[in-house]
Image (cartoon, rainbow, N blue to C red):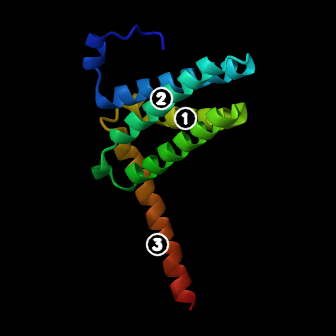
């Protein structure tokens, strides 16, 4: 994050931009937590991992369930990542942190790509993709039904 975030600049951000900021902050904290574990600074790692879980909670709390299936899927992903971070914190396992970091990076890149395309609501793009998936799923089910 190159931009200095003040309370005023945060209030000027759209919910979609705030989501991107939260992704970046969480990724940064995960990388620092992993380094802290490698340096045997478990107190710092603990605090950073707890901060990441707070961020994941806020991301989950901010989901718009009117967006359709994508919101439900994101909720499951956020919950999974939070559980993995709790386990990573208990075991001081950097591999689990790396797993969550990779998931967050993929989400962040997708989110930012949707923002850059000028999409007012990135979840609409994700919902459209999920819709296409659902159509394929139903089509495949119909093919199965036709064979019977």
Q: Quadrant of residue 44?
A: top right
What percent of the width, then of the height, locates residue 104? 55, 35
Q: List the residue tagged with mark 3.
A: 138
Question: Mark 3 or mark 2: which is in front?
Answer: 2
| Tag of residue 23 | 2
Which structural element holds mark 2?
helix
- Label ID, residue 104: 1
Q: Are marks 3 and 1 in contact (CB under 8 Å)?
A: no
Q: Residue at x 73, y 18 (%)?
A: 40
In the rendered view of the protein, which quadrant contains the C terminus?
A: bottom right
Specify whether residue 12 is in view.
no
- Whichever of callouts 3 and 2 sits on the residue coming sooner in the sequence is 2
Asked whether 70 or 147 is in front, the reply is: 70
Q: Is residue 23 above or below residue 87?
A: above
Q: Quadrant of residue 62?
A: top left
Q: Which one is nearer the viewer's eye here, 87 or 15?
A: 87
Q: Of helix, strand and loop, which one carries label 3?
A: helix
Instruction: Look at the numbered discs 2 and 1 and tell me whether their residues touch, using CB distance below 8 Å.
Output: yes
Q: CA distance from mark 2 to mark 1?
A: 7 Å
For residue 125, the mark is none
């Amino acid at each position: 994050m190159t931009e200095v975030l003040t309370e005023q600049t945060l209030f000027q951000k759209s919910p979609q931009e705030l989501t991107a900021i939260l992704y970046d902050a969480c990724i940064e904290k995960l990388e620092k937590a992993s380094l802290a574990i490698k340096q045997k600074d478990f107190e710092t790692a603990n605090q950073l991992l707890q901060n990441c879980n707070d961020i994941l909670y806020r991301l989950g709390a901010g989901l718009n369930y009117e967006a359709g299936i994508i919101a439900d899927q994101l909720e499951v992903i956020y919950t999974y990542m939070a559980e993995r971070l709790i386990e990573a914190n208990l075991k001081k396992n950097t591999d689990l942190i790396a797993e969550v970091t990779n998931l967050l990076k993929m989400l962040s890149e997708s989110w930012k790509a949707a923002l850059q395309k000028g999409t007012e609501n990135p979840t609409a793009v994700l919902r459209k993709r999920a819709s296409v998936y659902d159509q394929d799923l139903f089509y495949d089910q119909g093919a199965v039904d036709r064979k019977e």
